Image: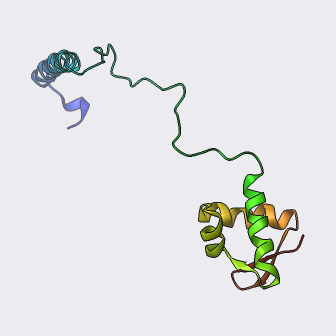
Amino acid sequence: MKITELTSKDLKKIQTLIEKKESLQSQIESIDQHLNSFAPGSSPKPSAKPKRRSAVKSTKTKRRRGAVTETIVKALKTAGKTGISAKELVAKTGIKTSSINSWIHITGKKSKLVKRVAKGKYAYTG
């Protein structure tokens, strides 16, 4: 239906539906506040927007800057001239596969620490 085809009867129907919707929304808000009062350690929330946490504690341990490079280079050195694959590096170091691949193709090649010795195998060139 086009706006130009609306009649006054249609507009009145729309108005009553909007009023009913607003009434129901206010009832839902009051029910939510009442339910939140039962939750331990919480207070009723005045707005529907969730609050942002300022400091979220991570369960992962943070590595110091350069630690990834150190561990990868150490593993590459122990592999020798035959090289090591990214999967083997993941198993030895415990670093994520995406981080290993990114390091090899960006940091390793830029700093000339890594050389591709075979398909999927990389060796330390130091």
Give the residue at x 63% y 75%: 88
Q: Which percent across, then down, holds residue 52?
A: 47, 26
Vertical side of 97 occupied by 40: above or below: above
Q: Would residue 105 be visible to someone looking at this image?
A: no
Q: Quadrant of residue 86?
A: bottom right
Task: Between residue 101 and residue 1, name the one nearer to us.
Answer: 101
Give the residue at x 16% y 19%: 31
Count of all numbered marks drawn on residues in the image: 0
Q: Which percent across, then down, holds residue 84?
A: 71, 78
Q: Quadrant of residue 117?
A: bottom right
Task: Between residue 19 and residue 116, name the one nearer to us.
Answer: 116
Task: Between residue 17 and residue 119, name the one nearer to us.
Answer: 119
Q: Is residue 33 left or right of residue 85?
A: left
Q: Residue furthest front?
A: 78
Q: Which percent across, then down, holds residue 82?
A: 78, 85
- Name the image colouring: rainbow
Q: Is residue 27 left or right of residue 65?
A: left
Give the residue at x 62% y 68%: 90
Q: Which percent across, then down, holds residue 44?
A: 28, 14
In the picture, which quadrant includes the N terminus?
top left
In the picture, which quadrant includes the C terminus?
bottom right
Q: Quadrant of residue 64?
A: top right
Q: Would residue 78 be visible to someone looking at this image?
A: yes
Give the residue at x 33% y 22%: 48
